[in-house]
Image (tube, rainbow, N blue to C red):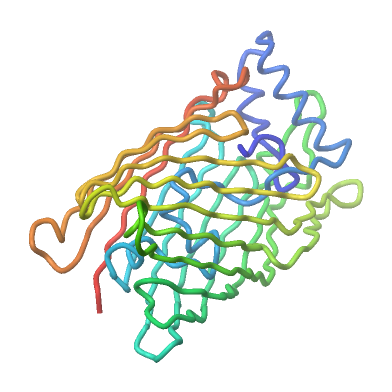
Amino acid sequence: MEKLITARDIRIFDELNNEQTDCPMNRLLLSLMCLLFCSQIDAQQLPLFTQYRQNATIINPAAVSEDYMLYEYNVSFGASYRRQWIGLKSAPSTQTLFGEYIYDGISNVGIVSGLYVMNDQTGPTGFTGAYGRVAGLFSNDPYYNGLSVGLSFGAVQYRVDVTEIRLREFGDVLTDADQSKVYPDAGLGVFYYQVLQGGFLSGSRIYGGVSIPQLLGLDLTFEDNTGAFYTKRVQHIYALAGMYNELSNGHFLESSVWFKYAPNAPMNLDFTLRYLMNNKFWIGTGLATSGSFHVEAGVIVGENIGLDHNFKVGYNFDYSITSIGPALGSTHEINVSYTFER
């Protein structure tokens, strides 16, 4: 679900006001944004990822990374950068940093732990959050299967740069002072994976999980000239499932789906198909029910040249195939990670 009109932000007023107003598309977008000040609008509030499998541990605090499931690398560090709607300079951008460690040395119980920092900015509004996560991994042999239950916890700073919020012919919307608020946040999730034994799919991996990454619903209230401006944040429900079908030794065809639901907003499904070649590179493509199409590719350097670690770089190009897509422009996402076994 693209971040079009949401309850979390006031969108890109200055950018549109600087465009030619005789453009029907610009007038349409500006009209939609004006609705934010006269009615409640509900939609996806949290940042999106097109390469969601690379960010599974942020989406679900109980998730086990593919680097562990496929290659037994239990330590990983990474970062991602996503710029949505490249045609608009004030469009959403998201940056993340993460680290993960899986300890599987205890009989029948392992520990999945991690840290991540996320920053998201859309026009005059944004947030920055820092989180820790911990999950119990229950398994007789964690390489072949496991059930994990996890919790994330942290603090998030929400901010509004009110000097950038203006509506043509209506003047400033808020006061002339920037405002920010800090709130606690938490997430909850469960995750399961299994290596299939015997039959046509022997050696293939299946996985699935459900999470509520924003467990604490809250109302963000900022003072304005007439009383208060507020954004209500609500719980989202995510489900992630897929299968690594082993074609031959080290070659996988992965099919996956990410289900997203926010109250009073349309449900969204994001489908992706990827081919992973012997821990060397991957290519993939996908389609979302929100009307976006994407292609992705990545390279993996390390184990294939005799090292005991992997360095991965992935790139994604996303484009909306809806009627409004050409006015918004494309979306780009880059992921890098470093993984090894300890």
**Given the current orientation, which residue lies at the most extreme left position?**
306
x, y (%) of residue 85? 52, 31
Q: Which residue is drawn at 61% across and 71% down?
A: 155
Task: For the N terminus, give its image quadrant.
Answer: top right
Task: For the C terminus, give its image quadrant.
Answer: bottom left
Q: How many labels does the image show?
A: 0
Q: Which residue is drawn at 73% across and 43% down?
A: 43
Up the image or down, 67 lies above or below 88; here it is below
**Given the current orientation, which residue lies at the most extreme right position?**
226
Q: Residue at x 59, y 73 (%)?
A: 154
**Given the current orientation, which residue lies at the most extreme front position?**
199
x, y (%) of residue 321? 55, 22
Q: In the visual, does 63 lie left or right of 173?
A: left
**Given the current orientation, which residue lies at the most extreme bottom position?**
107
Q: In the visual, does 146 lie left or right of 226?
A: left
x, y (%) of residue 341? 24, 74
Q: Which residue is drawn at 35% across and 51% down?
A: 200
Up the image or down, 219 lies above or below 49; here it is below
x, y (%) of residue 318? 46, 32
Up the image or down, 138 lies above or below 48; here it is below
- Report the front residue among 158 and 193: 193
On the image, which quarter does residue 203 sit in? bottom left
On the image, which quarter does residue 181 sit in? bottom right
Up the image or down, 246 lies above or below 212; here it is above
- Report the front residue among 21 and 280: 280
